[in-house]
Amino acid sequence: MDYIELNIKLQPLKPFNEIIVAQLADAGFESFVNTDEGVLAYGQVQETSVERALKETFLGEEREDVSFSFESQIIEHQNWNAVWESDFEPVYVEELASILAPFHDKSIAKGIIVEIQPKMSFGTGHHQTTWMMSKALFDLHPFPKKVLDMGTGTGVLAILAEKLGATAILAIDIEDWSAENTVENAERNQCKHIETKCGDVDLISGTKFDTILANINKNVLKAHIPFYAQSLNDGGVLLLSGFFDSDTDELIEFARAFGFEKEHIYNKDNWAAIKLIYKSRD
């Protein structure tokens, strides 16, 4: 399916660029790029549903506190791939890891190398949320053996988890092209312990994990947290990201009702990640 790009211009820029990203994520858009004038939003959204998505945001209102304009265009599947590849710069997770494309010179790498051919999938390490999740993996001691990567995208977190010591990794994504991309990238990195499935959170029913990774938007995370509680071993780690730092208290409080306790919060450029520990209530 083709993607739709929304080019949104805002005045003033802040805080409305953050507000519109959160609203459009809830309306079905998946990827965002901040510009000097506003936000570029991308989503596998049917053209007929764009009007509905806009009505669910302040773009469908008359407001005095912000002025805005927006244009939309269709980005064809092949062109989207080309955009990813042309813009893919090396990502360094401090000195710990390097996320590179196949065409990058490996001599520039630092730490563990993860080679990613991104195609259409989210999760190249460029976004703050993926970067924080990658950094958080290095803070797990001892490293968990059984890991779930929910909303795997390119598979970058699953691959990094295997390179850090995980021996049984389930990588799930609701989009078939992301599942396919994860399989390709796992093979590219000689990973032997990643099982990839296309589907939703119901696929984890009856399975227990030491650690669950979920880099998804806030509303999906809240819908999934009860399932994560059922699928984590006692004392297991839940790493969440995909939301703004202003949403951390809401998510921590929501997760507490299901037996999770906050251990650490990561922040990067107004985005956040949370490390939670599951304490069985039995």
Image: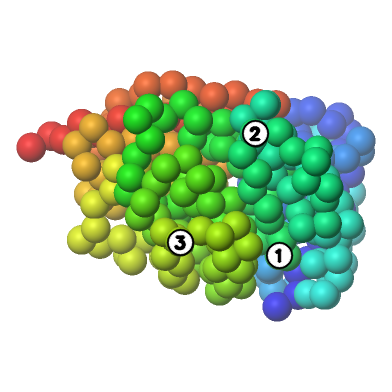
Q: Nearer the viewer, mark 3 or mark 1?
A: 3
**Mark 2 lies on residue:** 111
Q: In the picture, residue 236 is in which quadrant?
A: top left
Answer few, some or many: residues within 10 Å of disc 3's Cα (few below 14, many 20 plus, some between 14 and 19).
few
Which of these two is toward me, 117 or 202? 117
**Mark 1 lies on residue:** 120
Which of these two is toward me, 210 or 67? 210
Q: Tell me what residue is drawn at x 74 percent, y 28 percent.
A: 15
Q: Position of residue 210 (x, y in %)?
A: 29, 43
Which color mode does the image show? rainbow
Are the residues flagged by discs 3 and 1 in contact, CB closer than 8 Å?
no
In the picture, the disc for residue 144 is: none
Name the side, left or right, on which 211 lies relative to 65: left
Name the side, left or right, on which 91 lies relative to 264: right
Q: In the picture, residue 165 is in which quadrant?
A: top left
Q: Earlier in the sequence, mark 2 or mark 3?
A: 2
**Amino acid bearing label 1:** Met
**Amino acid bearing label 2:** Gly
Instruction: Tell me how far mark 3 sits from mark 1, CA to CA.
Output: 23 Å
Q: Is residue 53 above or below residue 108?
A: below
Q: Is residue 244 visible?
A: no
